[in-house]
Image (spheres, rainbow, N blue to C red):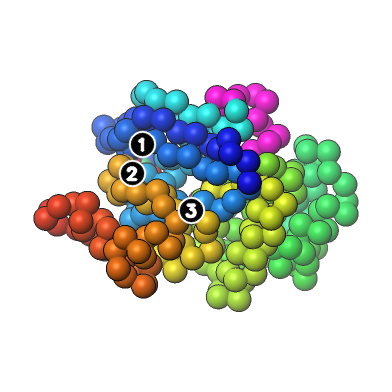
Amino acid sequence: MSSTPAVDVSSLHVHRGLHKALDDVSLQVPAGSITGLLGPSGCGKTTLMRSVVGTQIIESGTVTVLGEPAGSRGLRRRVGYVTQAPSVYTDLTVTENVAYYAALYGRDRAAVADTIAAVGLAGHAGNTADALSGGQLGRVSLACSLVGDPELLVLDEPTVGLDPVLRAELWEHFRALAARGVTLLVSSHVMDEADHCDALVLLRDGRLVAQLTPRELRDRTGEERLEDAFLHLIRGDAAGTETEETR
Ligand SMILES: Nc1ncnc2c1ncn2[C@@H]1O[C@H](COP(=O)(O)OP(=O)(O)OP(=O)(O)O)[C@@H](O)[C@H]1O
Ligand SMILES: [Mg+2]
C-alpha cells in the first residue's frame, strides 16, 4: 500500500440548493484498498463522491485525486464512477454497452467478455438492457466502468438490489481489484457491508463522524455488530440530540 493517499479531501464545504450538504469534511482514501463511505440517507455520500470525481461544484476546500485536482482532464481515464442510478443504453445489448466503454478506453473484446463475466452477466451478454432486472442493470453500469481498468473506482451503492450471493461475489471481485492495487471508494447504507472494507468513513448530516477501521469502530464503541456500533457513534456524536435510524 502506497503512503500517498489516492484521495485527499481537505476542509470541503458544499451546498446543494440551500442545504449545506458537506460541512468541513476532511478525509483520506488510502491507495490499493477499499474504503466504505457510510451514513444515513441524505448525509452527503453521493455529494462527496461527486466532489471526488469532479462533477460537483464546491464552495471551498480541496479535493486531490491521484495527485491531481479532482476533475482534472488527466484523471478522466484513471477514475471510474458508477452513479447510484444505472446509466446504460437500454436499446443496446449488455456486450454492446460494455464494448462502447471498452472502445473509449482502448480495451479489447477479451476485456469486454471478462468484465461481463466478472459481474455475473455472461448468460445475459446478448440481451438488450431493457430486458434486464434492476440489479442486472446496475451490474451493466458497473461493468462499463470496470472495463476501463481505472486506478480509482468510485461506486455509489453498487450492491443495492442484489441478492446475497451476488453481493458476496461482487465484494470478492472488489477485494481482488484492491489486491492488484486498485483503490475503491464504495458507498452503502447497509452496515454489514462495512466488514468488507479496510477503512470506513462515517458521515452524518454532511459532517464527518469518524474515519476508522471496522476493528477500531468495534473497539471504540464496545459493540460487535457494526450496525449497533455506528448507531452508538452517531448517538454519541449528536450529544443528546435526537437521532435518526441508519436507513
Ligand atoms: N439537486 C439537489 N438540490 C438540492 N439539494 C440536494 C440535491 N441533491 C441532494 N441534495 C441534498 O443534499 C444532501 C445530501 O444528498 P446526497 O445525495 O449527497 O445524500 P446521500 O448520502 O447520497 O443519500 P442516499 O443514501 O439517499 O443516496 C441531502 O440532504 C439532499 O436533500
Ligand atoms: Mg446517494
Gap in angstroms between the C-alphas marked 2 and 3: 14 Å
Q: Position of residue 36 (x, y in %)?
A: 48, 54
Q: Is residue 246 above or below residue 26?
A: below
Asked which secondary structure carries label 2, the reply is strand
Label 1, on which residue? 25
Query: What amino acid is at disc 2?
Result: Leu
Kindly check if marks 2 and 3 are in contact, taking CB atoms under 8 A apart as contact: no
140 vs 216, left or right, is: right
* Residue 195 horizontal/vertical position (percent): 49, 65
Residue under the image location 58 percent in, 39 percent down: 3
Residue 113, by quadrant, is: bottom right
Q: Tell me the magenta residue range.
A: 68-84
Is 132 drawn above or below residue 88 in the view shown?
below
Dots 3 and 1: beta carbons under 8 Å?
A: no
Instruction: Look at the image and say whether residue 75 sits in the magenta stretch.
Output: yes
How busy is the neighbourhood of tag 1: few (under 14 within 10 Å), some, or many (20 plus)? some
